[in-house]
């Protein structure tokens, strides 16, 4: 049986509401993303989407053989990569931002993400992601929150306009401790939730197929 090493990471939210930075690492994800967006802006690119998928307090399992890989990067565990999608002269592209390595941009013309976004952009802008709430037998409504959860975030940068959508996985579950989430159907049927699901599929397949080509280590 393949030996596996279990890494337990409990990392905490920053003031911005996510644990992406490692204080021992000089490079941080936010700065890398910001710098990359500036590079795209310098190329007159003004249609972008930033996608994040991370967990606050998590257990991750990795094969022991990864420790011997030259590409193994310990700092990347609490600093989950961020993905950027954009349109350049009609061509759809994407890249991966990591504190461990710099990656080349990849063509993404088969991704239907933008075809879903533009016809629904006004709806998406107004959509509200509601918290987990339940009703008691007395018809009272209470809100539940979880301090350690997983999150998926979208940031649309279209010209001078920025639209952000933040999904907490806990708000997307149907039931917890026999309490039914009355906002479950609302949250899971949002247009922005469909975009999140699509980008999760796109990035997962890209990682599996080694689509993101490493340029160099940081």
Image (tube, rainbow, N blue to C red):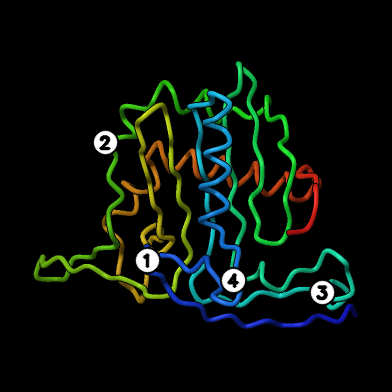
Residue at image coords 48%, 69%: 19
Q: Which mark is residue 63?
A: 3
Q: Which mark is residue 147?
A: none
Residue 58 screen position, x and y as percent? 56, 75
Q: Nearer the viewer, mark 4 or mark 2?
A: 4
Q: Are circles 1 and 4 on residues that touch, CB within 8 Å?
A: no
Residue at image coords 27%, 70%: 144
Q: Are circles 1 and 3 on residues that touch, CB within 8 Å?
A: no
The residue indicated by pointer 1 is 175
Q: Nearer the viewer, mark 3 or mark 4?
A: 4
Task: Pick whichever of labels 3 and 4 is earlier in the sequence.
Answer: 3
Counting other residues with Cα less than 10 Å from the Cα at mark 3, is it few (<14), some (14-19), or many (20 or more)? few
Q: Quadrant of the N terminus?
A: bottom right
Counting other residues with Cα less than 10 Å from the Cα at mark 2, is it few (<14), some (14-19), or many (20 or more)? few
Q: Is residue 29 above or below residue 46?
A: below
Residue 44 screen position, x and y as percent? 53, 23
The residue indicated by pointer 2 is 126
Q: Is residue 58 above or below residue 131?
A: below
Query: SS class of the residue under badge 1?
Result: strand
The residue indicated by pointer 4 is 78
Q: Are circles 1 and 2 on residues that touch, CB within 8 Å?
A: no
- Cα–Cα span, label 3 and label 4: 17 Å
- Cα–Cα span, label 4 and label 2: 32 Å
Task: Pick whichever of labels 4 and 2 is earlier in the sequence.
Answer: 4
Task: Pick whichever of labels 1 and 2 is earlier in the sequence.
Answer: 2
Task: Pick whichever of labels 1 and 3 is earlier in the sequence.
Answer: 3
Query: SS class of the residue under badge 4?
Result: loop
Q: Is residue 112 above or below residue 2?
A: above
Would you say 208 lies left or right of 10 here?
Answer: right
Would you say 168 lies left or right of 61 here?
Answer: left
């Amino acid at each position: 049986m393949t030996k596996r090493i279990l890494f337990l990471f409990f990392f905490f939210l920053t003031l911005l509401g996510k644990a992406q930075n490692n204080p021992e690492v000089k490079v941080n994800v936010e700065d890398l993303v910001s710098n990359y967006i500036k590079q795209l802006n310098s190329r007159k690119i003004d249609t972008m989407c930033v996608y994040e998928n991370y967990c606050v307090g998590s257990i991750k399992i990795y094969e022991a053989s990864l420790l011997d890989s030259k590409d193994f990067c310990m700092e990347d565990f609490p600093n989950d990569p961020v993905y950027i999608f954009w349109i350049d002269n009609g061509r759809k592209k994407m890249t991966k931002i990591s504190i461990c390595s710099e990656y080349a941009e990849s063509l993404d013309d088969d991704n239907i993400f933008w075809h879903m976004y533009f016809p629904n952009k006004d709806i998406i802008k107004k959509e509200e992601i509601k918290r987990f709430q339940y009703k008691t037998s007395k018809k009272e409504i209470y809100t539940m929150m979880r301090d350690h959860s997983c999150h998926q975030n979208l940031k649309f940068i279209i010209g001078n306009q920025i639209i952000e959508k933040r999904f907490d996985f806990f708000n997307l579950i149907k039931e917890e401790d026999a309490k039914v989430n009355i906002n479950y159907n609302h949250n899971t049927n949002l247009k922005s939730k469909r975009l999140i699901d699509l980008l999760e599929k796109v990035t997962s397949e890209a990682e599996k197929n080694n689509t993101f080509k490493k340029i160099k280590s940081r």
